[in-house]
């Protein structure tokens, strides 16, 4: 996977958009595609879901 692709802002992911992108940034600190991948790797490796 290209490093440049991983640096794409999360709101450009299909189905996310500006409003959900803002929510992901505020609630889960997910700003880019890379952050989203790392978030799911942590959740699946620990078996825990992070909640507030």
Image (cartoon, helix red, strand yellow):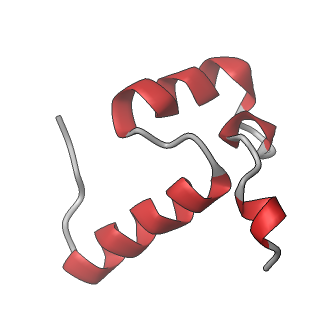
Which of the image's four quarters has the N terminus?
Answer: bottom right
16 and 11: which is toward the camera: 11
* Residue 36, image x, y percentages: 53, 56
> From the viewer's perspective, is residue 36 above or below residue 45?
above
The number of numbered badges drawn on the structure is: 0
> From the viewer's perspective, is residue 46 above or below residue 49?
below
Residue at figure coordinates x 65%, y 55% from the top left: 33
* Residue 48, image x, y percentages: 19, 66
| Residue 12 placement, left or right of 10 | right
| Residue 52 placement, left or right of 11 | left
> From the viewer's perspective, is residue 2 above or below residue 49?
below
> From the viewer's perspective, is residue 18 above or below residue 38?
above
Residue at figure coordinates x 72%, y 40% from the top left: 9
Residue at figure coordinates x 64%, y 17% from the top left: 19
**Residue lying farthest top?**
19
Which of the image's four quarters has the C terminus?
Answer: top left
Residue 21 image-quadrant placement: top right
Residue 10 image-quadrant placement: top right
* Residue 39, image x, y percentages: 41, 60
| Residue 38 placement, left or right of 37 | left
| Residue 38 placement, left or right of 21 | left
Residue at figure coordinates x 56%, y 22% from the top left: 22
């Amino acid at each position: 996977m290209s490093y440049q692709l991983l640096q794409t802002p999360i709101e450009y992911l299909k189905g996310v958009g500006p409003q959900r992108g803002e929510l992901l940034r505020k609630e889960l600190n997910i700003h880019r595609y890379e952050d989203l991948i790392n978030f799911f790797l942590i959740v699946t490796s620990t078996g825990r879901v992070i909640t507030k």
